[in-house]
Image (tube, rainbow, N blue to C red):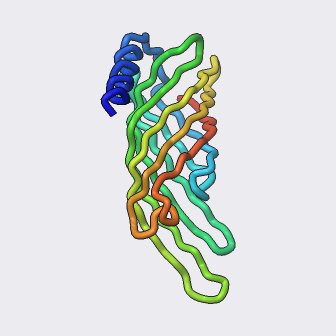
Amino acid sequence: MKKSILIVCAFFGVISFLNAQEISKNAIGLRLGDADGFGASISYQRAIMENNRLEFNFGWSDGKNYDGIKFIGLYEWVWSIDGGFNWYAGPGIGFGSYRIENPYGGHFKDSFAILTGVAGIEYNFDFPLLISLDVRPELGFGDDAYDNDNLDFDVGLGIRYKF
């Protein structure tokens, strides 16, 4: 455990010396991921400092026997790699709710809180387009959050318009 904490501290110490690249003030688009059945989400990013931003995602799923929504808020640090490439990481929280219909009658509902984080890489084009690839480990807290498996790794591809 002590080695893990030391490695994480050293890692963040090294990356804190990297130069930050100016990030777009606003970006809106879609994040396509597995999201434990939630699929696509509307994604909005808002720069709050030179190399920090907030990201909000609203995901939904609507199927024959399944309906769900999920809202995630993230605080992200952004570091420049080279050219238009950046990488980012940060913590987040969220909320989700879903309803499953039983084809033989009745239904099951659950609402849950989410503790999450994000780590990803992005590319800023010279025109107003931003693409990203990230992973979000999500820990759900609810009666039956994530079908009694409280940890989910959500991998997503983001496409956003910068303004």
Up-down relation of residue 61 to residue 102 (above or below): above
Q: Quadrant of the N terminus?
A: top left
Q: Which residue: 65% across, 88% down?
A: 104
Up-down relation of residue 82 to residue 50 (above or below): above
Question: Between 138 and 121, which is closer to the camera in this rendering?
Answer: 138
Q: Which residue: 63% across, 45% down?
A: 32
Question: Between 117 and 61, which is closer to the camera in this rendering?
Answer: 117
Examine the image and state in which quarter residue 76 appears: top left
Q: Which residue: 68% across, 73% down?
A: 64
Q: Is residue 35 rendered to the left or right of residue 142?
A: right
Up-down relation of residue 84 to residue 67 (above or below): above
Question: Between 130 and 88, which is closer to the camera in this rendering?
Answer: 88
Q: Is residue 159 rendered to the left or right of residue 151?
A: right
Count of picture labels: 0
Q: Position of residue 71 (x, y in %)?
A: 46, 53
Q: Which residue: 57% across, 56% down?
A: 36
Examine the image and state in which quarter residue 16 appears: top left
Q: Position of residue 66 (x, y in %)?
A: 61, 70
Instruction: Report the residue that reaches farthest toward the left.
Output: 2
Examine the image and state in which quarter residue 121 appears: top right
Q: Is residue 7 rendered to the left or right of residue 120?
A: left
Q: Position of residue 38 (x, y in %)?
A: 59, 57
Instruction: Report the residue that reaches farthest toward the bottom.
Output: 105
Q: Position of residue 108 (x, y in %)?
A: 52, 78
